Amino acid sequence: MKSVFIVFYIILITFLFRPTYSTYQFFKLSLQWPPSYQQQYGVPTIQKNFTIHGLWPQNFSRPWPQYCSRSPSASFNIKTITNLRGQLEIDWPNLNGQSLNDKFWEDEWNKHGTCSLNKFQQFQYFSLAIDIKNKLDILRLLENAGIRPNATVTYNYIDIVDAIKAKIGPFEPQLHCVMPHNNVLLLEVRVCLDDKGATYISCGNRYNSCQGNRIYIPE
């Protein structure tokens, strides 16, 4: 009986700590507009450019992969991204406060990053998000189309989408809006790429919460 218990224990430990990397079909990069975040959640921010919310491995149909590895070797290690810290603090800050950055990055890695471990290690994953975000440069794309943050001016949904498509091609981004004080504010822009993060694809329109509204992009 004791030997049976030992075998069962070994099998259980092996199951709990084995790598469980999930497959995924594409990436979704979510970029948030800090002034809208500030109005929605009541937290001060000095950020005046789009920042990364997350880089999320996705499937075209649910369930979407999350928390894909319990292996200790896949655990978040801040030392792995030491050389990226300065850039992460600019591009991927916790908008609730810089002192929470490490926890934010850890949560995003554990929930989402581990699901891309079959292609990207931790340093590569964070580097990829930074690279996509800065090459896209959403704020510049909007400004090139005459769409500038303003407390009193509203913009059409399609004009914002078309400004983004000028860079990503004929692929649908997603816009996520919130409504503090009954004003429709652009909170997030989400773009989708293939499973290598190299080529844009359409995100689809199912989760666009801004359609049909005049949209503010607050200063």
Image (spheres, rainbow, N blue to C red):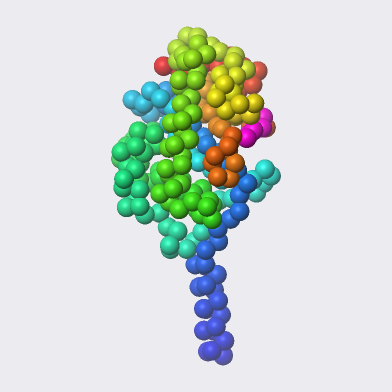
Q: Does residue 179 appear anywhere in the picture?
A: no
Indicate the position of residue 65 as horizontal and vertical percent values.
59, 50
Residue sitting at x 63%, y 46%: 25
Q: Nearer the viewer, residue 51 or 107?
A: 51
Quadrant (top left/top right/bottom left/bottom right) for the N terminus:
bottom right
Q: What secondary structure do most residues of the magenta stretch adopt?
A: loop
Q: Does residue 105 appear anywhere in the picture?
A: yes
Q: Is 204 within the magenta?
A: yes
Q: Nearer the viewer, residue 44 or 139?
A: 139
Indicate the position of residue 212 as horizontal and vertical percent values.
65, 18
Please, which residue is most extreme toward the top here?
152
Residue sitting at x 60%, y 29%: 173
Indicate the position of residue 91 as horizontal and vertical percent values.
39, 34
Q: Which residues are magenta?
A: 201-205
Residue sitting at x 38%, y 46%: 103
Quadrant (top left/top right/bottom left/bottom right) for the C terminus:
top left
Residue sitting at x 34%, y 43%: 84
